[in-house]
Image (tube, grey):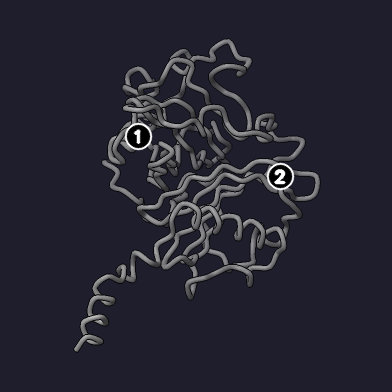
Amino acid sequence: MLAAMVSAVAITASPPALAAQSCDRACLSGLITEYVDALVARDHSRLPLAGKVKVTEDSRAIQLGEGLWKTVTGKGAFRHDYLDVRKQVAASHVVLREGDNQALLSVLLHVQDRKIAGIETLVQRITRDSRFQPTELGKPVRGMDDPVPAGKRQSRKSMIQTALTYTEGLRVGSFIDGGTPFAPGTYRVENGVITAGEGCGRADCDMYAQNIILHPGIIASVAAVDEENGVVLLWMNFGHTGNSYGEGNALVTFEAFKVWGGQIQSINAFFKGLPVATARFWPSSDPVKD
């Protein structure tokens, strides 16, 4: 009888199997490290995979080991993670090398039972002829790692709503009319170049002073929400805007927004031009209002 009672107590006290198999922040960050190391080694057999894994590069389905796996030659000096513990997504902006050139990698690992169940990537290759020549990808992006001030933290839903005002500003061609709440001196880095805030080197470094074209067909999807660090990562297709991004192309990006106190504080984006019809082919982690 006593043995049965002890056994029953032990079973009752055991944590649920699902909780035991969830990835915490350290686990999610570790999976990104494993992924990058395996990628640079060109050895995907080293990855902890959850059965058959869906893999996309630039919104095209590929086999694991194709695409960047065949051309990468080393690591760069930049990596910034966005860890969504609630939705089990490990995302990162990472700089890699392809010979003398940089490859700006946006990667999302969709995690199940502490293993990689899906791999989503966007790769922008930087050559000597690229319009954007990165200058800011050897150090953390200003503000992105700052702790959220006491009393300024927003709920997950509120963070997403704040980030999506950026999309709305692009849609109507005005961050003022779009109601986008930028903090004073909001800092933005795009493909490694400062395009707003201190050091941008332009006459219109303030976000509200910049002229932006209409993006009436812009589409957004929530890729990950780092609730602890106050960051929302959006996938966006900027839609048809004439030939602004090359004939037949739209700008496609994974763009991270540091959000607290009801304002966008800092932005980091990796983007590239892809056919205007490019879809994400992965579900939004959270609802996005049309």
- Residue drawn where x is 65% and y is 41% of the image: 78
Residue type pointed to by label 2? Gly
Q: Residue furthest top?
A: 203
Q: Is residue 60 left or right of residue 9?
A: right
The residue at which mark 1 appears reads as: 164
Q: Residue furthest front?
A: 2
The residue identified by callout 2 is 76
Which corner quadrant holds the C terminus? Answer: top left
Residue at the location (48% across, 16% down)?
A: 185
Spot occupied by residue 201 in the image (x, y as percentages of width and height):
63, 15
Q: Neighbour class for label 2 at 10 Å: few (<14), some, many (≥20)?
A: some
User: In the image, what residue type sits under mark 1?
Assistant: Leu
- Residue beneath the point at 44% across and 25% down: 265
Name which residue lies at 69% across and 48% down: 96
Check disc 2 and report its element: helix, strand or loop: strand
Q: Position of residue 192 (x, y in %)?
A: 63, 33
The correct choice, above or below, for 72 with respect to 154 in the image is below
Judge whether 149 appears above or below 102 on screen.
Answer: above
Frontmost residue, 78 versus 280: 78
Residue 117 in the figure: left or right of residue 217: right
The quarter in which the N terminus is drawn is bottom left
Label 1 vs label 2, nearer the camera:
2
Disc 1 and disc 2: Cα gap in Å?
30 Å
